[in-house]
Amino acid sequence: MIDPNAFVSQSSVIGVYGEGFDEMRVSVKKDKKKMKIVFATNNANKLMEVRKILGDQFKVLSLEDIGCHEDIPEKGQTLEDNALLKAQFVYNKYHVDCFADDTGLEVDALGGAPGVYSARYAGGVGHDSEANMTKLLHELENNNNRKARFRTIITLIIDGKVKNFEGVVNGEIITQRRGGEGFGYDPIFQPNGYTETFAELGTGIKNQISHRARATQKLAEYLKTLKS
């Protein structure tokens, strides 16, 4: 394999390999500067959101990228418990720097439910978003208190050191689904200050204001301090 760093001048590279090689050399150098870190998920939607928010300075790997196909148990009683369980599982087994998240929708009228059980609120196997929304809307029927918030906890483990980041967005549960983008409870959650649901706002705006965006921004700011 050719080592791009062995070429000391652009002119000599162009003379032997053509102009395109020098562009490739620059691209390789840029890629080497990226910080690699594992996001303990195989959820394509979450992975896409986080990669967009973190940007080109980081190479975010999924569980599949490191050969992890296990269903990591989420047996904690809080979001913080679950995020830590997932991050510790990956760090201890694969010995890589990583982060994991857990997110819950907390509804005032339901005493903070579904909370840590948001993904499996309707029961059954897997994450059935339609069933979860149907159950939630049914439980809030004829209830005027629709206040809710999304809360995300991200747990980062680097060199064995643990650090948490929290993101919160307040809003309300509307009475029927609206919008075709997003995932989970997005079609029925309307953030404060907006007349659209997360599913109507689109990923561009959502990735600026969402709970996961806010926690991930805090994560990114911290990771940048480690690179400097």
Image (tube, rainbow, N blue to C red):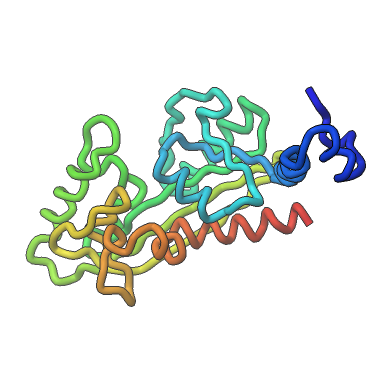
Residue 32 seen in this snapshot: no
The quadrant the C terminus occupies is: bottom right
Considering depth in this image, is 36 or 96 the residue closer to the camera? 36
The quadrant the N terminus occupies is: top right
The residue under the point 56% across, 60% down is 217
Considering depth in this image, is 27 or 9 the residue closer to the camera? 9
Relative horizontal placement of residue 89, taking residue 135 as reference (left or right) = right
Question: Looking at the picture, does residue 15 appear above or below residue 166?
Answer: above
Considering depth in this image, is 149 or 200 the residue closer to the camera? 200
| Residue found farthest to the bottom | 193
Q: In which quarter of the image is residue 59?
A: top right
**Residue 3 pos. (x, y %):** 83, 30
Q: Quadrant of residue 171?
A: bottom left
Question: Looking at the picture, does residue 3 appear above or below residue 57?
Answer: above
Residue 157 seen in this snapshot: yes
**Residue 85 pos. (x, y %):** 52, 37
The residue under the point 45% across, 56% down is 212
Relative horizontal placement of residue 90, taking residue 11 as reference (left or right) = left
| Residue found farthest to the right | 8
The tally of labels here is 0
The residue under the point 32% across, 55% down is 105
Considering depth in this image, is 220 or 24 the residue closer to the camera? 24
**Residue 12 pos. (x, y %):** 89, 39
Relative horizontal placement of residue 138, taking residue 219 as reference (left or right) = left
Question: Looking at the picture, does residue 95 appear above or below residue 200?
Answer: above
Relative horizontal placement of residue 104, taking residue 48 as reference (left or right) = left
**Residue 92 pos. (x, y %):** 63, 29
